[in-house]
Image: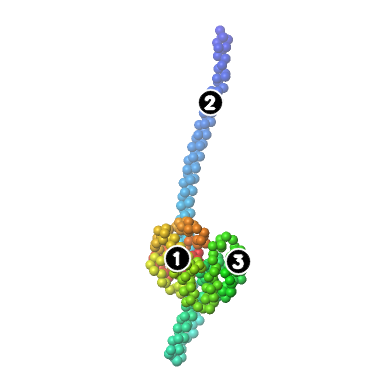
Amino acid sequence: MTSSILCNFWWLPWLLLPLLGLAAGWLLWGKYKSMITDLNVTIDGLNSKIKNLETSLGECRSRSADLEGDLALAKGKLREIEGVSLKVAKSPAVDISSAMVGFGAGAISSSSDAVRSDKYAWLTQDNLQVIEGVGPKMDSVLKENGVNNFTVLAAKSPEELRAILDKYGDNYQIIDPTSWPRQAELASKGEYDELMSFQKQLDAGVAVGTITDSKFEKMMMKATGIRSFKNNDLKAIEGVGPKIEELLHNAGIKTWLELSQTSTAKIQEILDSAGPNYQLADPETWPKQAELAAEGKWSDLKEYQDFLQGGR
């Protein structure tokens, strides 16, 4: 009887094995599910920390930019103080009686000549960046190829300059050096008024049909502290010329305040969308400059710009 019953349940061992497998699988799944839940919680925590770190990094970068600006202003003030101290130390005592001798038309003329000379005292013969179309990188390129001053540049033909530029790849294909020798000739002869008039017909060194700002005049204003910019004239910003000002205006940035509140990334996006002609522009300092202009801090802006080249 017992053997008969056992025979009828011969399949039980075969059923038991799958049931044990299911039980083991359920236990393992429960264990791994708990592990997955814990890992997801850990990942969420790490993502939150990363987000907080990215926010902190952005704040650090912003603070770093502000500190760099403050440092530049401090250096400018220090240099100004040192310059004043040096002038005081070197200034001879004034003999009023001898200064009055011969006072008249000749004396007035001499005084006028001295003022005119001082007005251009900042300009040196190797300052090729006063040439419309020549920026910091181009200045280095020219000097690497022996073009070290206005006289040498004036003697070069546009074809010779083109051959120099062609050595440096596609980034320099868009640059037109046609007007550089004439500008350099005027600069080498000290014909600065003529240079300014000539540059007003150029944009990035190329003749255009409209009147533009003279680069030489802008650099002279920067060097002498003279300001003639109209309110919200974006060209007051070092690195911004008529074409870039037009781009910014088209993008809705029409005031110093608006420019100061625009991120560098957004400005770079505007420049990039305008094509390769603007790839050498660097807008990193433009918001800081615009902030100083918007607040009317012209002396601070001048000191800040004294440490910049093409807005860098």
Colour treatment of the image? rainbow
Residue 32 higher or lower than 181, as above or below = above
According to the image, label 3 marks what residue? 163
Vertical side of 103 occupied by 138: above or below:
above
Residue 62 coordinates in the image, percent (x, y) = 46, 58
Q: Position of residue 94 (x, y in %)?
A: 46, 86
Q: Secondary structure at mark 1?
A: helix
Is 85 or 230 nearer to us in this picture? Answer: 230
Q: Tell me how far mark 2 sits from mark 3, CA to CA.
A: 80 Å
Residue depicted at x 58% and y 71%? 157
Q: Amino acid at mark 3?
A: Ala
**Spot occupied by residue 127 in the image (x, y as percentages of width and height):** 54, 72
The Cα–Cα distance between marks 1 and 2, rounded to whole angstroms, is 77 Å
Q: Nearer the viewer, residue 167 or 128?
A: 167
Residue 7 shows in the view: yes
User: Tag 2's secondary structure?
Assistant: helix
The first of marks 1 and 2 along the sequence is: 2
Under mark 1, the amino acid is Pro
